[in-house]
Image (cartoon, grey):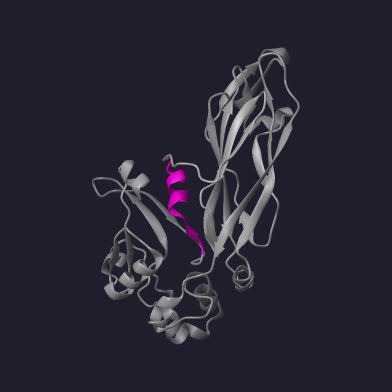
Amino acid sequence: MDELESAGIGAAAISYDSPAVLQDFAERRGIGFPLLSDEESEVITRYGILNTVAEEALGAGEENPDLVADVARYVSVFGAGQLFVGTPYPGTFVVDGDGRVTSRYFEEFYRERNTTTNVLLKEGIGVSPIEAIEGSSPQLDFTAWPSNTLVGMGTRFSIVIEVRPGENMHVYAPGAEGNGYRVIGLELAPSEMYRLEPVEYPDSEIYYFAPLDEYVPVFQEPFTILQEVVMAATPETEAALAEMETITLSGFLYYQACDDAICYLPQSVPISFVLDTEGPDRLRALQ
């Protein structure tokens, strides 16, 4: 929170839970930002994110196979119940100082949740690296780090790669593969425990490579790429995570760089992170 406040950013969460439930949750989880109670779901409704699927499933539609599938996707894999009536679709709004919504992040599956750090990265707001890996070569230096070191079922986080090309160097960007070059990217080993979203790149620039009389997209200034990772949120994953204390993500950073005269061979650098894991907090359902 100190880093958020120093950047002029505040955080608050709103829920249909009672103040007592939210206070208990905040104390158990060590949450220091405001948790706002909207027991009648009035604000949730005004923001257009009231989840009506649970209430629909409690009526005649509970035998509708399409509605049953919607319940599993948007409400609970354990089925609908009165407890879920009034809940919002989970997500995050970014609001400016005048109260205007500037961005929103919502999921297609209720068990998947963006972390705060992941949202900040997508907003282009700098955050301090944690558990960083440093690498260096004659062509570039890089720092790689996970946005979060604690993940659980459905956590949406990112592996961050900050790249600093060497003097007079350019690193090939998406689109350069059409000219036969290796585009910089992170390739993590596949796993049933998570899925990988497409790598997010900043805007590149077009470079004229005189020796070959060609124009190619490159990065010449320091840049950052994000490899978003989404932890699986199936019952099987939940059972597996219950037996784990950590999960390892391993892979390679691939890139190719050139200067004004020489084009160097593609390079690969091994990268690995060990992240702590946690299970879901279901104490709310018992109250």
Residue drawn at x 67%, y 34% as measured from the top left? 183
Quarter of the figure with residue 24: bottom left
User: Is 125 left, or right, of 18 in this rendering?
Assistant: right
Can you give x and y, in whole percent of width and height, for residue 239 in the image?
A: 62, 73
Can you give x and y, in whole percent of width and height, for residue 40 in the image?
A: 27, 74
Is residue 206 highlighted in magenta? no
Instruction: Using the image as rendered, state which of residue 136 and residue 264 is in the foreground.
Output: 136
Is residue 115 highlighted in magenta? yes
Q: Please give the range of residues in magenta.
A: 112-124
User: Is 274 left, or right, of 81 in this rendering?
Assistant: right
Residue drawn at x 51%, y 52% as measured from the top left? 148
Instruction: Using the image as rendered, state which of residue 249 and residue 90 is in the foreground.
Output: 249
Instruction: Using the image as rendered, state which of residue 246 and residue 266 is in the foreground.
Output: 246
In the displayed structure, 21 sits above or below 272; it is: below
Residue drawn at x 45%, y 49% as measured from the top left? 117
Can you give x and y, in whole percent of width and height, for residue 209 in the image?
A: 66, 16
